[in-house]
Amino acid sequence: MLISRSFWILSVLVLAGCATTRGVVDLSVDEPEQATSVAPDVEYRGKVYVGQITDSRVFALKPPDPSIPSLKDGQIDNVELKARAIARKRNSFGKAMGDILLPEERTVVDVVRENITLALQNSGYEVVQTPQEDAITLDADIKKFWAWFTPGFWALKIEFQSELAFATEVAGLGSGAIVEGYAHQRHQAAGTGAWLQTIGVGMDDLRANLEARLSAPP
């Protein structure tokens, strides 16, 4: 079940106009006032503790396709940068340029955890902050979480893809289940608003697909 209002807030912190520079943006979920609350008008389904979330995305030095994560100056061994990286800027010819990162205190794991939490709440689950005997522990692995663009003559296309693998059975979400999110939009330029709008739609799609699985009969 989806609550009517939008649940993603995309706040620009730094995103210089030059494609060669690193940009920093934040992807924040507009959570309910009580972090553990269940969405209104939803059948209560029990307690869930969101446990370990791992980021197993594979970065390449010079990937043949922009949908494969990469980092400016070939810094694919930089663990801190990889944890924050969500996109790679390119010039009008498609050449890879600067990165787009989350703020220093934020990682892709944080963003995914927030969206999983919200999807659980929307589906009738009470999310607890510590492991409990009467709570299911839900672990997940981030396989994909990346945005990229393809140049075009009249308009360029920005795409976003995410893929999560779950290791715990919760209602319609069986052990080993894969849930994906995707968005693609046409824009006149790959400016701040274009990137954030497409990523936001993709995050909405990921959460909606996860809620559909969680809301299935047990």
Image (cartoon, rainbow, N blue to C red):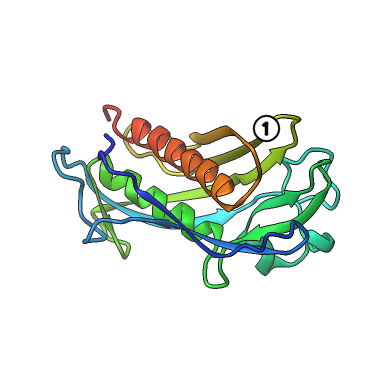
Label 1 secondary element: loop
In this view of the protein, which residue sits in the foreground, 56 or 148? 148
Q: Is residue 181 above or below residue 83?
A: above
Q: Is residue 105 left or right of residue 76?
A: left
Q: Is residue 93 above or below residue 127?
A: above
Quadrant, the C terminus: top left
* Residue 84 visible somewhere in the drawing: yes
Q: Is residue 40 left or right of residue 197?
A: left
Circle 1: residue type:
Ala
Kindly identify the residue that appears in the image at 20 percent across and 49 percent down: 38
* Residue 137 visible somewhere in the drawing: no
In this view of the protein, which residue sits in the foreground, 83 or 133? 83
Quadrant, the N terminus: top left
Residue 70 rendering spot, x and y as whole percentages: 76, 52
Q: Is residue 130 above or below residue 206?
A: below
Residue 106 rendering spot, x and y as whole percentages: 52, 66
In this view of the protein, which residue sits in the foreground, 46 or 96? 96
Kindly identify the residue that appears in the image at 50 percent across and 55 percent down: 53
- Mark 1 Cα-neighbour bin, 10 Å: few <14, some 14–19, many ≥20: some
Q: Is residue 141 left or right of residue 151?
A: left
| Residue furthest bottom as drawn | 105
Kindly identify the residue that appears in the image at 59 percent across and 38 percent down: 161
Residue 80 rendering spot, x and y as whole percentages: 66, 69
Residue 137 rendering spot, x and y as whole percentages: 37, 52
Question: On the image, which quarter does residue 85 sit in?
Answer: bottom right
> What residue is shown with label 1?
155
In this view of the protein, which residue sits in the foreground, 171 or 212? 212
